[in-house]
Image (tube, rainbow, N blue to C red):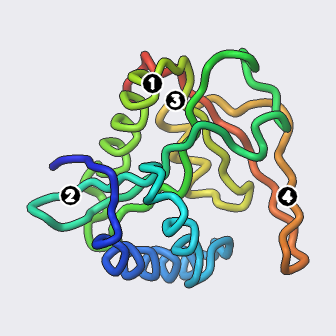
């Protein structure tokens, strides 16, 4: 298995993978993404080398966005607010490859990449009602920051997100 920046040729495979992820989330009662999201964001991230994929024998099995900042960065109480940090978002694992440790591998990749960029923390935000994600991040040793990032969406909905962080020197 290898990680690499995503490119435009990956878009059809990513769209298919995330449509399946969204359907699985909805079946679990997690209604936070829709079948259009996060695909449009990928179009913006690919030219900036912010979207990474993990492949296994040429097949995309996970994807993750690795970013230098996040709109909610100042909304929560990090342990060291001014410490250099890298943000991750939109972690997705192929529904056909669940229970193979791919989330752990993808998060360890994100930690290593953040460390190589000089960050002390890998940070992320998870919607408060996304219990599977919140539980996974806590299980993997991410620490919940104080407070919450509240975002008012264009469709009138409100998104409430916890901030999580992990020192880049800690593996999962």
Which residue corresponds to mark 3?
Answer: 141
Which residue corresponds to mark 4?
Answer: 151
In this picture, is 89 found above or below 137? below
- The secondary element bearing badge 1 is classed as loop
Question: Could you say where residue 101 lies in the image, as x and y percent from the top left?
Answer: 28, 49
Q: Which mark is residue 131?
A: none
Of labels 3 and 4, the one closer to you: 4
**Contact (Cβ within 8 Å) of mark 3 with mark 4:** no
Q: What separation in Å lies between label 3 and label 4 (alpha carbons)?
A: 25 Å
Of labels 1 and 4, the one closer to you: 1
Say which label, 2 or 4, has the lower sequence index.
Answer: 2
Which residue corresponds to mark 1?
Answer: 117
Of labels 1 and 2, the one closer to you: 1
Q: What separation in Å lies between label 1 and label 2 (alpha carbons)?
A: 22 Å
Residue nearest the viewer, comparing 139 with 47: 47
Say which label, 1 or 3, has the lower sequence index.
Answer: 1
Question: Could you say where residue 143 lies in the image, as x and y percent from the top left?
Answer: 63, 29
Say which label, 3 or 2, has the lower sequence index.
Answer: 2
Judge left or right: residue 77 versus residue 127. right
């Amino acid at each position: 298995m290898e990680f690499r920046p995503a490119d435009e040729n990956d878009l059809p495979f990513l769209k298919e993978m995330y449509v399946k992820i969204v359907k699985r989330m909805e079946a679990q009662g997690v209604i936070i993404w829709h079948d259009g999201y996060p695909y449009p964001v990928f179009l913006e991230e690919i030219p900036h080398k912010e979207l990474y994929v993990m492949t296994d024998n040429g097949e995309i099995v996970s994807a993750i966005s690795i970013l230098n900042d996040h709109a909610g960065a100042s909304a929560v109480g990090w342990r060291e607010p001014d410490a250099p940090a890298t943000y991750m978002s939109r972690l997705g694992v192929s529904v056909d490859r669940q229970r193979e440790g791919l989330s752990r591998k993808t998060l360890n990749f994100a930690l290593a990449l953040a460390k190589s960029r000089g960050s002390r923390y890998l940070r992320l935000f998870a919607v408060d009602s996304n219990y599977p994600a919140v539980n996974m991040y806590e299980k993997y040793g991410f620490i919940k920051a104080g407070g919450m990032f509240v975002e008012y969406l264009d469709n009138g909905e409100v998104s409430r997100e916890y901030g999580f962080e992990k020192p880049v020197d800690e593996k999962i």
